[in-house]
Image: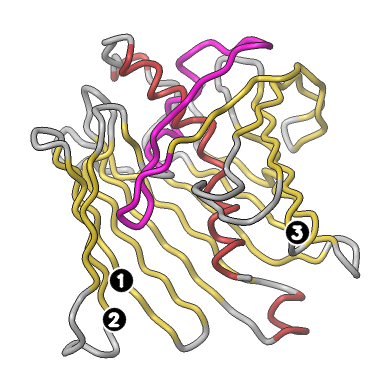
């Protein structure tokens, strides 16, 4: 269940990443001065599952852009942490932490580092993106068994390939419109996936920001050969304003209906 949940939670950023891929395909570079976010910006979401019991709180999801740069690069940190009923009733805990190093000029991912804890199981990984040689090199280790050989995967990438986090702070930069469709390449755990995305509607949504107009975005992440190899559907609502904030996601899957909603936003750029 945890593998499905953390991928669903992190896939909230897919809508952002697909728009970054469009920018790369158009040969455009992002102007750092025009970025609609401030260093230190933090977005916090809560994930709930509805199956037998309605609205079980299962996880908190947080994305933060570091206050200090890595030279000219950005460091974006994301985490998914189990909480509430999942811990009390099912005695199941997980922690998934990810750090994405993102280049300043193209705003594309350079490195992805993760720390993955499932009860007593722990895995650390690092993916390095080599655009010159068109490869992503992924290495996974078990810190509890340092003598165990690491798991290694290398895959071919395109110039517009991204990880699940690198596009989060760029979706406000590009226009959305009902009827538009896109396709992106996303790398996760050393593998590369092709994800079709459609903008299907413009709707009002209740949120911590008030009643706001949003674009309804539907990434096709479920099914054989997809990011999540199970049956299901996903919808993401993204604000129709200059900030382009993803405020809600709804997922129908084998574990039930999952609702992910923005519950706090700090250090937003004026």
1 and 2 marks in contact (CB < 8 Å): yes
Measuring 42% from the left and 62% from the top, which residue is drawn there? 97
Sequence-wise, which precedes: disc 2 or disc 3? 3
Secondary structure beneath disc 3? Answer: strand
Spatial CA span between label 3 and label 1? 26 Å
| Residue drawn at x 29%, y 14% as measured from the top left | 31
Residue of label 1: 124
- Within the magenta stretch, is there residue 60? no
The quadrant where residue 29 appears? top left
Residue 82, percent across and down? Answer: 61, 70
Residue that badge 2 annotates = 142
Q: What residue would you read off at disc 3?
A: 48
Q: What span is in magenta?
A: 165-193
Mark 3 or 1 closer to N-term? 3
| 13 w.r.t. 55: above or below | above
Q: How dense is the environment of label 1, judged by Cα within 10 Å: few (below 14), some, or many (20 and up)?
A: some
* Residue 87, quarter of picture: bottom right
Instruction: Count every numbered label the image shows and give the total.
Output: 3
| Quadrant holding the N terminus | bottom right
Going from the N terminus, do you reach mark 1 or mark 2 first? 1
């Amino acid at each position: 269940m945890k593998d499905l949940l953390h991928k669903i939670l992190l896939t909230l950023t897919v809508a952002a990443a697909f728009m970054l891929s469009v920018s790369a395909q158009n040969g455009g570079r992002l102007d750092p001065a025009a970025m609609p976010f401030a260093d230190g910006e933090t977005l916090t979401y809560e994930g709930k599952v509805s199956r037998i019991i309605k609205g079980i709180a299962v996880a908190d999801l947080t994305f933060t852009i570091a206050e200090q740069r890595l030279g000219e690069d950005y460091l974006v940190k994301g985490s998914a942490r189990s909480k509430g009923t999942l811990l009390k009733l099912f005695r199941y805990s997980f922690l998934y932490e990810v750090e994405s190093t993102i280049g300043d000029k193209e705003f594309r991912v350079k490195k992805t580092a993760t720390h993955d804890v499932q009860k007593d199981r722990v895995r650390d990984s690092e993916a390095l993106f080599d655009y010159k040689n068109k490869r992503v090199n992924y290495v996974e280790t078990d810190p509890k068994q340092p003598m165990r050989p690491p798991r290694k995967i290398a895959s071919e990438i395109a110039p517009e390939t991204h990880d699940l986090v690198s596009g989060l702070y760029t979706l406000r930069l590009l226009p959305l419109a009902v009827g538009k469709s896109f396709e992106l390449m996303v790398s996760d755990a050393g593998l590369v996936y092709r994800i079709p995305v459609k903008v299907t509607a413009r709707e009002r949504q209740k949120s911590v920001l008030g009643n706001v107009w949003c674009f309804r975005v539907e990434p096709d992440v479920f099914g054989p050969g997809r990011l999540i190899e199970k049956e299901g559907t996903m919808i993401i609502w993204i604000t129709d304003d200059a900030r382009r904030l993803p405020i809600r996601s709804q997922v129908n899957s084998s574990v039930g209906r999952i609702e992910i909603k923005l519950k706090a936003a700090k250090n937003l750029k004026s």
